[in-house]
Image (cartoon, grey):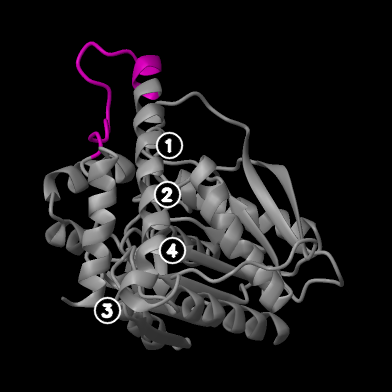
Amino acid sequence: MNPLAGLVDRVQEVLRARDLLEPSPVPVRPAPGQGVPEWLAAVAEIREEHNERALVAIDAAEEFGAEFFGGPPRPAGPGAGRVRRRSVRVPVDDRWLPRGEIELAPGVPAAALTPVPSLAPAVNTFRMVVHEPVDGPSVGAVVVLHGGGFWMGGGSLLDAVGDEFAAFLVDRAGLTVVTPDYRLAPEHPFPRSTSDALAAVRWLAEQGFGHDRIVLQGTSSGGNCAAAAAILARTIPGFAPLAGLILSMPALDLPESIRISDDPGSRRDLLTAWAGPNPLHHPVLSPALAPALAGLPPSLVQLATDDEIARGGAEFAAAVRSGGGRAEVESHPGTHTVAAPGVQTARWESCAVFARRVCAAA
């Protein structure tokens, strides 16, 4: 048996034993007769179930990686006392979305986007964890945007997985890393997650980091959020170019992600609840579909050879190059969520090297 396929099967066995192989469907909107508070409670409960499933799968892949490949898939973290961790509250600002057409590149306009009304009560802040070197100043800063299909991945799962990646970047590259627990669909639809990413950049700027020393990094749907934030940042007066953009297994072609899904109806419902009246093929929502993207920072796109979920990374890199920018593409063996030992280390090392290089160039 192919070792990667064997590891995927073993992870599924673990999920089946925990009754997590087929988690509850996402309630993308209130059911007939269901009040908004009851719907929000149901979303929170099912989100926690999906977060638990993801963490069980990650732990199972690590545990059984040695059986199929000879070692754990995740790198060891830094020694105790080398990374300082603190939590802050970042003010929400939903005024980032430009009015009217969006220029993707000279002579390449995109239609205006419409903010989608939120069914959840308004919030004034979101939680963000700051990871910084204990010894010495930071070379720069990275905003890490977690994945989770636009609707999960925050909270306890972000703390369990995001903390590990953030600490790795701090230790290996001497960077300050922030992990925003950004607002999620379906209760907080577009452009809330993108707004929170830009608010995280603004917070770092207020701490003394110039935009040319700040990198946006995102994985999966977080990669979509990072790319959209970088595109929209170009339209904000006074928002200087960022140092870099790192997209890991990014979901940048949403219509294609629906097409390849094993449950296209459910994926379409969730993405439509997030996007509202905005078409999923819009080049801010699906940046891989842009013919050219000008003014974006140097970009690193990381692909998985057997990615069964996300599409568009290579096409996005081509659009950046067509717009006169620089984009690197690297491919690593693995599925969207499961990889051989050493692959996660290689991905994270590449992120650390790239982020340090573009920040040090400022």
Classify residue 133 as left or right of residue 41: right
> Which amino acid, mark 3?
Thr
Residue drawn at x 65%, y 57% is 178
N-terminal label among 1 and 3: 1
Q: Nearer the viewer, residue 75 or 43?
A: 75
The kind of secondary structure element at disc 1 is: loop
Q: Which residue is mark 4?
A: 219
Residue at the (52%, 73%) spot, across then down: 245
Find disc 2 in the rendering and name its residue. Answer: 55
Check disc 1 and give the amino acid type. His
| Amino acid marked by disc 4 | Thr
Residue 188 marker: 1
Q: Earlier in the sequence, mark 2 or mark 3?
A: 2
Instruction: Give the magenta part as a residue range.
Output: 23-40
Between disc 3 and disc 4, the foreground one is 3
Q: Residues within 10 Å of mark 2 (few under 14, many from 20)?
A: some
> How far apart are labels 2 and 1 at the CA level?
23 Å
